[in-house]
Image: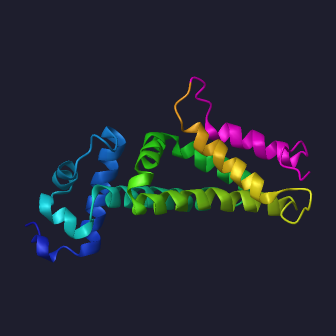
Amino acid sequence: MPRNRQQIPREERTGDLLAAATELFLAKGYDKTTMADISAAAGVARGNVYWYFDSKDDIFAAVMDRMLSREIRTLSAEQAGADPLSRLVRGLSDMRYSRPLHQAMHDRLPHSEAVRAAHNTFLAWIVGLVDEVMAEHGLDGDPDIDATLLRDTVVTVFEGAHVPNDRNRPAHEMLRFLMESVLAGRSPVKRA
């Protein structure tokens, strides 16, 4: 016999909503997914979704945070002995399936603090791995390397790779090239 909805713990219901929203956002995209779609897929009355999430942007931000957290956990387990550059490249490569959702994040940034926060969490993960690469190679204290410029360049390359273009070169390939160039001393980010 199914449990009464009131007996289902809040965390479990939230998980159901996030699972349904993730599947729908990946299948239909942000714009074509409605709160009614999410509520129906999760088996929650439409109005009750708003007890858990204030808006579609809030559930979208939670989905993106959840996807990133899972990816980080997976990478930590599978790539425990790998160098930071390999973890960064692998993580970005593994997340290519969510590229349309990353673009949707950009579209929603001006409209939602929750989406901005989720996006910033993602960028902080990238920057953290760049910092690990620099530390591993002794560049974090190198006076000839402008660490802020390197971080900003990596983020810009990643963000720019998600803008539709004719080349469609994967971000992880460009970032590996950039970081390997820096490590080899052919850096465009040396201090003047």
Looking at the image, residue 135 sits to the left or right of residue 40; the answer is: right
The extreme top residue here reads: 166
- The magenta stretch spans residue 101: no
Magenta part of the chain? 166-192
Please tell me which residue is depicted at 20% across the width and 70% down the height of the picture: 51
Q: Nearer the viewer, residue 137 or 82?
A: 137
Please tell me which residue is depicted at 18% across the width and 73% down the height of the picture: 8
Where's residue 106, x and y in %?
A: 47, 47
Where's residue 146, x and y in %?
A: 83, 57
Where's residue 42, x and y in %?
A: 20, 56
The quadrant holding residue 131 is bottom right
Please tell me which residue is depicted at 63% across the width and 56% down the height of the picture: 126
- The magenta stretch spans residue 188: yes
Where's residue 111, x and y in %?
A: 38, 54
| Residue 82 visible in image | no
- Tell me how many marks there are: 0
> Does residue 128 sit above or below 32 in this rendering?
below
Q: Nearer the viewer, residue 110 or 83?
A: 110
Q: Nearer the viewer, residue 68 or 74?
A: 68
Q: Nearer the viewer, residue 40 or 167?
A: 167
The N terminus: image quadrant: bottom left
